[in-house]
Amino acid sequence: MKYIKAALLIDGTGREPVKDPVIAIEGRRISKVGTIDTVKIPEGAVVIDRGRDVLMPGLIDSHSHAGEDSKRAESVSEQHLKPDPLRALRGYVSLRNDLECGVTTVRLLGDGGGFVDKILRDAIEAGELTGPRLLVCCLPVRPSHGTAPEIAQCQGADGVDEVRKRVRQAIYHGADVIKLFTSNISNGDTFLDYLKGDLTKIAAYTKEEMAVAAQEAHRAGKKVAAHCIGGKAIRWGIEAGIDSMEHANLIEEEDIPYFLEHGTYISDPNLHLFFDPVKGFESPHNKSWVWEELPDWWHEKVYRARENTKRVMGKALRDGVKFALATDLNHGGLWLEAKYFVEEIGASPMEAVLACTRNGADCCGILDETGTVEPGKYADIISLPGNPLERIDHLEKAAFVMKQGEVIREDLCTGN
Ligand SMILES: [Zn+2]
């Protein structure tokens, strides 16, 4: 039995923070959550005293790719086309970075061939590597003319029969989640063709194809996450039973009631790409492309999508649409998504905290295991040197990270 003490606990349920918390941990799980007055710490027990720190659930990243990292001076396609062993090694480095930053669960939504995602998941689960708990898709499902072919690394799946087969293959290979590309098509295979197809509202799959994917996935108890920027694919996908719309930057106001009726998540709105001067589309620090050298029509698309993201996602949030935040390729940067969720989308700091804890877990279908600090759940716990409800930037620096009861990181804490 171990005990963690600190100044404050934000337990991830949405409740008011608790002062002078004590969390009791037995093996990999939380056994009690209370305060110094309600949880008795036995004489001689192991106590992790985090001083004036703020405790929180481990963060959840609902959409990432192990083998791509925006820190590298290579395009995303180049990174995905590297040999499998190199992508696995790079993935380990990037995911380790995520864990050190407080992300204890990551959902990987496309890592090319060689089942690199599954190999990393299983090696971490077996204790051979230290990393966040992974949920993986094994084989992303995309049509022949779909965007980002390098993420799938297999023939397109077209028509309901092929989609059904691809979903079943993914499940056979050990997928925790089914990834589907339901919007954006490529009309040519160059980088510019990719950009032409990106940030559009063109549906890539029919509603019938989406529905069969959702049915197959749900029958096997898996969630379906759809790359979907906007257009009809959003409503078709929601009605077809898809669980999360990934990105959704061209969401329309008329889509909001569909999200609300079906409880569908917006996952990974990719806020850093639109709003961050260092990591975003327009950044002079971007190592994958030079913004000024890209055509004006691409600039216009980015501006339109940014305005839309701010305006319509803001309304969606106020109306009650559920959000899960994620990094996509910006490993170690989940805090940036939370920052822009507050500053640009208009979320409260508590909503931002929930979007990378409880909601992330709920979106991924693992809320009974993690996402909040409550008895019975995995002891996925972090501490921060400052209160993110006062300043969301405090999410950047996890000073203490515990994953399933194991201490991963333990910096000197404030007030000791
Ligand atoms: Zn992605």
Image (cartoon, helix red, strand yellow):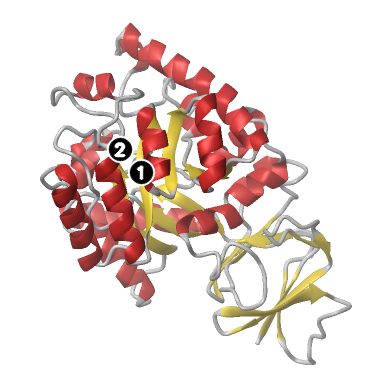
Q: Do the residues labelled 1 and 2 touch (CB within 8 Å)?
A: yes
Where does ligand 1 appear, by image quarter?
top left
Residue located beneath label 2 in the image: 182
Residue positioned 22% across, 54% down in the render: 139
Picture quadrant where residue 247 is located:
top left
Residue shown at the point (44%, 46%) measured from the top left:
244
Q: Earlier in the sequence, mark 1 or mark 2?
A: 2
Query: Amino acid under label 1?
Result: Ala
Amino acid bearing label 2? Thr
Helix or strand or loop: what does disc 2 sit on?
loop
User: Relative to residue 275, is residue 351 depicted above or below?
Assistant: below
From what the image shows, is residue 90 above or below residue 368?
above
User: Residue 226 shows which numbered tag?
Assistant: 1
Q: Residue at x 46, y 51 (%)?
A: 62
Between the residue at mark 1 and the residue at mark 2, the CA separation in whole angstroms equals 6 Å
Observer-nearest of 363 and 34: 363
Quarter location, residue 349? top right
Look at the picture and state if 126 lies above or below 169.
below
Q: Position of residue 287 (x, y in %)?
A: 34, 29
Q: Is 44 situated left or right of 188 in this image?
A: right
**Quadrant placement of the C terminus:** bottom right
Q: How many labels does the image show?
A: 2
Q: Quadrant of residue 204?
A: top left
Quadrant containing the N terminus in the rendered view: bottom right
Residues 15 and 60: in front is 15
Answer whether residue 325 is visible to the viewer in this image: no
